[in-house]
Image (cartoon, rainbow, N blue to C red):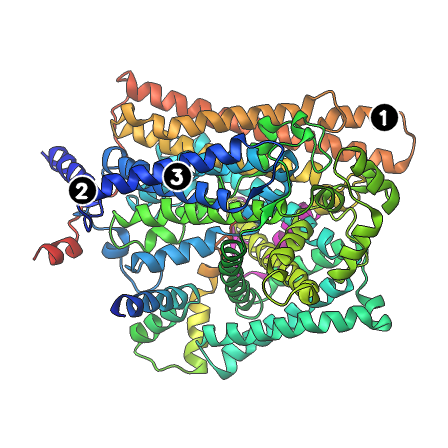
Amino acid sequence: MMRLREMVNVVLAMLREIFDESAYRRFLERKQMVSSCKAYAEFVQENELLRARRPRCC
Amino acid sequence: MLIARRRRIGHNNWDTLRTKSMPKPLRIVMWIGIALLGALAVATIALRRGEQINAMWLVVAAFCSFALGYRFYSNFISAKVLALDEQRATPAERLENGRDFVPTNKWVVFGHHFAAIAGPGPLVGPVLAAQFGYLPGTLWVLAGAVFGGCVQDFVILLFSIRRDGKSMTEMAREEIGRVGGFVAYLAVISIIIILLGAVALIVVNALKASPWGAFTIAMTIPIALLMGLYLRRLRPGKVLETSVLGFVLVMLAIWGGQWASQTPSVARVFTLTGPTLAILIIIYGFAASALPVWLLLAPRDYLSTFVKLGTIALLALGIVALRPTLHMPALTRFVDGSGPVFAGSIFPFAFITIACGAISGFHSLIASGTTPKLIRRESEARIVGYGAMLAESTVAIMAMIAACVLQPGTYFAINSPAGVVGQAPEVAAATITAWGFPVTAAEMHSLAQAVGEQTLFNRTGGAPAFAVGMAHIFSNSLGGQAVMALWYHFAIMFEALFILTILDAGTRVGRFMVQDALGHIWKPLGRTSWYPSIVATSGLVVAAWGFFLWQGVKDPVGGINSLWPLFGISNQLLATVALCVATTIIIKMGKVRYALVTLLPLSWLVSVTFTAAWQKIFDPSPRIGFLAHARNLASSPTQEASRLIFNDRLDAIVTGFLLVMVVLILLESVLECVKVLSGRKQAGVKETPFVASRFATEEQG
């Protein structure tokens, strides 16, 4: 049961990383902000160039 | 002293990287069992002739080969060649900034890396290569992945980690020389342009004369915009929730597509010809690459990743649960090179047709991009680099199964261009039946009706055949024949969705590369926020891939015959560049005796790329050689013939250019290695100096 819970946690963490939720959480921690439209807009702006330069594989 | 210490650590890794949860004799018995089972499965798929086999043999062969490759070969590379050092801090640890450098759990990085490397390539390549039968493609995926693709991804990832996450182009310039760096840059931009042209053609071929498909894909644009606004204004940061919402809307769009296809006034609007679709996709590519990332690219990326991961998992479950029978023979008569899907014999064309899934140069860009900045410990590069590529190869095996569960006659009817089998259904069916693969126009008509299409003849590009195969597998378990059309359009949507994401992202990446280069000539052109520069460089990149797309759409033999090999050659050229970089670094590390690890796949790729490029330019058969095809048309006075001749000559020049690039980087790489080996140059690599890892210290403490 513990192993299953661990696996579910890892899968959730994986999804949060892939879908940038973890990156947003780290951004909020780094900037000492709470989640809001303004904070998210800042996060998106900070990551815009990084994301746009990331190639997607064939 | 330092070298001695490192070697000791490298040696220790050999032991510490093993699984020790099992008694040793049991472990030995287990691995012997896996090896024997793998050998039996490979023998079964290789030696059975004249009888159909179950798809599970392919699954078992892949599982056993990949397990053995990972356990023994990657362990050997980890310990002996790369000497992974647990004590050495990675850039994620040393340069941690909470943005791009973040020490991350290895499984999380594995998922992130897999999501980045898995695209339409491992789905389309095996489907096209199935024209030779299931055997050549399957064996190439198994061997190519274990000894080539996984090795490339793993070593490039590790070398990038040891250089603060530097890109492949930077590593080529530093370790090989200026020419190497320049060739790597040109290889990257060439592959991006040819890739975008080829994948856009796949979407066009999948959506032409398909109101259902065109409606669904058109709807994904407002859905992505809605997701972007929802994320920005209503639920900031809730990406998973937004992706689920987007997925539900896409499902509704698929369902709505059925209504659209059955409502004459709406169906008329969405029944589009190839050229119209090509123009729309070119306009879309230009507009999407100029819009803010958060508005279209990011939400579409999230949505396509969500659908991609779910569909791959679902397909794997479907294959294992249903264990379908393969109707395609192990080898078809087209091994001689006369195939209708693409012309050319197994060697070299099977090996450039399946790039992603066996070895893909594009992966080296990902392995030297985001991923090295997330790895917490050097030892974790093994599961991420080698392991994620094995997962992608598993996707390629599933695509091969999806293509081969179809009756061969159906497969060839879908994938053969009208220019080869004829335009009229009866003529096409008669031609394919005469090849020994029985099919009738009535059967194809009823299959087209079952999947909600007007026709399935001449739907080249691989996507429709994959979608029919996937719908065939799913409809046997979930919902029966009644929902086959929904499954078919789900598969088409799934492929088209991430191809459009690639178009958008690829155009942007290409644009930045062009801006970086032009910035050296005139500074304002290099400013990524200067609008005239954005418009001009986006236009340049879109025009380049749009040209290849247009050429493919207007090609009477479907375009895939010329574009996919060109894409395969350019992708393998990039892999050649990556393996040149890797081999040079290994030799400079003083590990000449282990250089074969990258030298063998490099030699194979050089022989494949050279032979394929040579044949595509100079082969006397008009179906293979660009110049022979141009000569064949020379007697025709029409304007259409002049255009085709121009295209053929241009394709020959592009292929020749790629060949020259391979020669240049090889020569510079060989010269660099000879200098080091002869003692004329001091051996030494440009790694970041050793810093002790606090993670290792914490664990030991």
- Judging by the rendered image, the residue that carries numbered circle 2 is B24
Classify 10 Å Cα crowding around label 2: few (below 14), some (14-19), many (20 and above). Answer: few
The residues bearing labels 2 and 1 have C-alpha atoms spaced at a distance of 70 Å
Classify 10 Å Cα crowding around label 3: few (below 14), some (14-19), many (20 and above). Answer: some
Q: Is residue B84 visible?
A: no
* Chain under callout 1: B
Direction from residue B490 to residue A56 in the image, left or right: left
The amino acid type found where label 2 is placed reads Lys
The amino acid type found where label 3 is placed reads Leu
Direction from residue B186 to residue B475 in the image, left or right: right
* Front: mark 2 or 3: 3
Seen at 47% across and 60% down, the residue is: A51
* Chain under callout 2: B
* Front: mark 3 or 1: 3
The amino acid type found where label 1 is placed reads Ala
In the image, which residues are magenta? B521-546
Dividing the picture into quadrants, the one containing residue B589 is: top left
Q: Secondary structure at mark 3?
A: helix
Classify 10 Å Cα crowding around label 1: few (below 14), some (14-19), many (20 and above). Answer: some
Does mark 1 fall on the same chain as mark 2?
A: yes
- Judging by the rendered image, the residue that carries numbered circle 1 is B634
The residues bearing labels 2 and 3 have C-alpha atoms spaced at a distance of 20 Å
Q: Is residue B532 magenta?
A: yes
In which quadrant of the rendered image does the C terminus of chain B lie? bottom left
Q: Which mark is residue B37?
A: 3
